[in-house]
Image (spheres, rainbow, N blue to C red):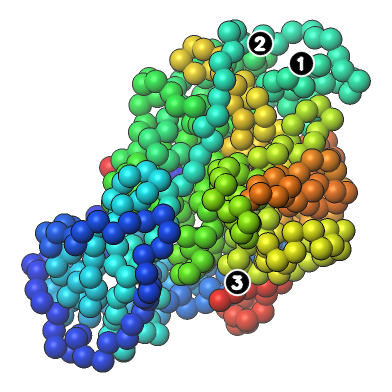
Amino acid sequence: MVAAGLLVLSLFSLALGRPTAESRDNLHVLRSRSAVPSGFTWRQKASSETMLNLRIALVQNNATGVESALYDVSNPSSENYGHHLTKAEVEAMVAPTAESVEKVTAWLSKNNITANKISPAGDWLGINVPVSQANALLNADFSEYTVDKTNTTAVRTLAYSIPETLKDHLAFIYPTTHFIEPAQKTTPSFQIVDLPRTSKRRRSRRASVPAACDQQITPECLQALYNIPTTPASATGNSLAVSGFINEIPNQADLDEFMSVLRPDSPTGAFDTVSVDRGLTDTTQPGTVEATLDIQYTVGIATNVPTTFVSVGNRNQDGDLGGFLDIINFLLDQDAPPLVLTTSFGFNEAGFEQEPDLAVSLCTAYGQLGARGTSILFASGDGGVSGSQSSNACDGQAFVPTFPSGCPFLTSVGSTQGITETAADFSSGGFSNIFARPSYQDDAVAAYLTKLGNTNAGLFNTQGRAFPDVSAQGVNFVVDVGGQGQGVSGTSASSPTFASVVALLNDELLNAGKSPLGFLNPLLYSTGAAALNDVTTGSNPGCGTDGFPAVEGWDPVTGLGTPDFAKLLTLVTGSAASSTSNSTDASVSTVAATAAASATATTGKKHHHKNKN
């Protein structure tokens, strides 16, 4: 997934001191909350000696230019399609102005604080200060709050301020007033006595699909359902990455057994590991279910594509959300980031809605990777319309969208089940309350809303970015954990499956001298829909309702449908740009120059309103 090397996030401060008189005068309240949000309980004042790792987001000089360039290189009808930007070109767009850097660092220096650049473009700075100094610097009141779901502690403040002179240079500081519940992951599993060995099985009516695939999914099932080739990938430069959080780790011996039983035709399964924030990398220790699923169904499907497990640890003080920031900055710092990235973790969007700045910043970072040629895929969630996980807390209330699936710069993946493919009832889908609907999905979503009529009226944002974009099988995936067969269900099975298809498509493109696919959605919503299997039955109940129904065309349960590799290959080999024009030629520079000159010109609509060991 990633080139060798780790992003260094060494956050430190000099001798402590009180804020200067200048910094106390003419303060501007940057963020404030009137009350502690639901899901958190005030515990006590934070100890004055508790150290805080604070991330300072500076105002980017041309974030809309990134958006414009992303769509330009991702739209098949554009003459710049596939001419992805270089690292330097993207960084030039999001870097803060010299004035912003000077003003913010001068303010910190006057208060005896030294900041460290923690993003490659310099739009994020890091400081390490005790609560006492943070309170004085920001006119804040940091306290300890209990996260009710996990009984863990988060240090937050309900308000903070900065000098008036910095309000046009400093976007926000994290973590401060951000009250966001931890990321969710798939957990349901059941035990299987033996791994089902690949064999000549009785065939179903869908002649190429083993009948047993109606009860449990193996690599053979996915290959048959989606016309996925078994031929080993061979392209130089191809790569696939799996991100892992919350102490997840795959086990190499488990993968070896999985491959020997279920992919005996394949070369020995192998993957690399990279650590961010001291993430686990010892693949001889017992494997965890989520990481096992992700690795066994990337290595096991994307045959011979170089695969990397990016393990994100907790050396960031703020757990998995801090890890989301650190992994994206780690990847952006790579000269050759992965061509495909799949993530099976996510959040309920509600925690970001009062202060969407962090969600917008993460989304823009995903757009940066997309503009450089990375296809980013996220599992949509496992709670139907009730969010990342099934919950009755929203009964009688509005539906709960998930994040990052609501970000318009990535591909969200829902779930299906059965040989004939119907929607899996847990497949999260809906409409963002933070991000507006991008133009690439206007026609598809408008058609769905017309069919939906008054169903669920008032329970979702009809103008929001709609998700998921696509889907794949997600029920009863057979995995090998500790030498024992288990079955796992969830959209976190679907995302690595679809990501593996994309990685194999990239392999064909690279071998043909073409560019990798990069950001997928403009292609999928235009000509790509015809190369997908439309899923028209099922729904995703939640919040005391039947949720959204799957229908012909796009729907917020299964998106545009499931992949057909053969059809997709025919599509992309006819539309992809030659790699000889990629990244360094004049056309790429033209894309970047055009975006820089027209910061307000975008093909999609703008939004509303993740350390070295």
Q: Which residue is mark 3?
A: 607
Which secondary structure, mark 1? helix
Instruction: Name the spot of residue 121 as percent of width and height, x first.
Output: 41, 66
Q: Amino acid at mark 1?
A: Ala
Q: Is residue 8 visible?
A: no
Q: Left or right: where does residue 1 sit relative to residue 610?
A: right
Local crowd size for mark 1, using a 10 Å CA cut-off: few (<14), some (14–19), many (≥20) = some
Labelled pair 2, 3 in contact (Cβ < 8 Å): no
Which secondary structure, mark 3? loop
Front-most of residues 586 and 19: 19
Q: CA distance from mark 2 to mark 3?
A: 47 Å
Q: Which mark is residue 212?
A: 1
Local crowd size for mark 3, using a 10 Å CA cut-off: few (<14), some (14–19), many (≥20) = some
At horizontal 46% and vertical 47% (from top left) the residue drawn is 183
Q: Which mark is residue 158?
A: none
- Image quadrant occupied by the C terminus: top left
First reached walking from the N terminus: tag 2 or tag 3: 2
Front-most of residues 56 and 434: 434
At horizontal 32% and vertical 66% (from top left) the residue drawn is 176
Q: Left or right: where does residue 483 sit relative to residue 128?
A: right
Local crowd size for mark 2, using a 10 Å CA cut-off: few (<14), some (14–19), many (≥20) = some
Q: Is residue 524 visible?
A: yes
- Quadrant assignment, res 358: bottom left
Indicate whether 264 appears above or below 465: above
First reached walking from the N terminus: tag 1 or tag 2: 2
Q: Which residue is mark 2?
A: 196
Q: Amino acid at mark 3?
A: His
